[in-house]
Amino acid sequence: MRLLVGGLARGAAGLLLGLLVGVAAVAIHPWWWGLLLAVAASSAMLLALPRGVSRVAYAAAWGIVVALAATPRPAGGYAVAGDLAGYLMIFWAVLMIVVSAATVSRATSRAGRADPGK
């Protein structure tokens, strides 16, 4: 039970962090220095998080923020435009999701850890 509660807490923290960093990244990405800061800070946070649910939740939330910002609004316009900076943000969101999914640690059985030669 403690493992489930801990996993839910890490997942919720990753989601909240991804939402906050994603909104900040979308807000500052139109400037060249903002784009560099957004990509660097988002990537550093992704790599600083432990492997598992918190990293995947962070990348998913960050990607959702960018995807929602790239969709047209009812009043017209986009928060993430179809220019080089916007395409880089979309590419970076996909890359972060792929990296987070690829670095999820695999659970091994105790027998597998005891005999690594097999």
Image: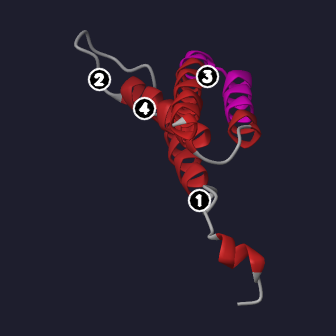
Which residue corresponds to mark 2?
72
| Circle nearer the N terminus (4, 2) | 4
Which residue corresponds to mark 3?
21
Which residue corresponds to mark 4?
64
Amino acid type indicated by mark 3: Val
Q: Residues within 10 Å of mark 2 (few under 14, many from 20)?
A: few
Q: Nearer the observer, disc 4 or disc 1?
A: 1
Outermost residue toward the left in this view = 74
Q: Nearer the observer, disc 4 or disc 2?
A: 4
| Circle nearer the N terminus (1, 3) | 3
| Circle nearer the N terminus (1, 2) | 2
Q: What SS does tag 2 mark?
A: loop
Q: What SS does tag 1 mark?
A: helix
Q: Are marks 4 and 2 in contact (CB under 8 Å)?
A: no
Per the model, the C-alpha gap separating discs 2 and 3 is: 21 Å
Residue 28, compared with residue 75, is above or below; it is below
Residue drawn at the location 72% of the way across and 33% of the way down: 45
Q: What SS does tag 4 mark?
A: helix
Q: Which residues are magenta?
A: 23-42
Tell me residue 4's x, y (percent).
51, 38
Residue drawn at the location 48% of the way across and 38% of the way down: 60
Per the model, the C-alpha gap separating discs 4 and 1 is: 18 Å
Can residue 81 be seen in this snapshot? no
Residue nearest the observer in this picture, 53 or 99: 53
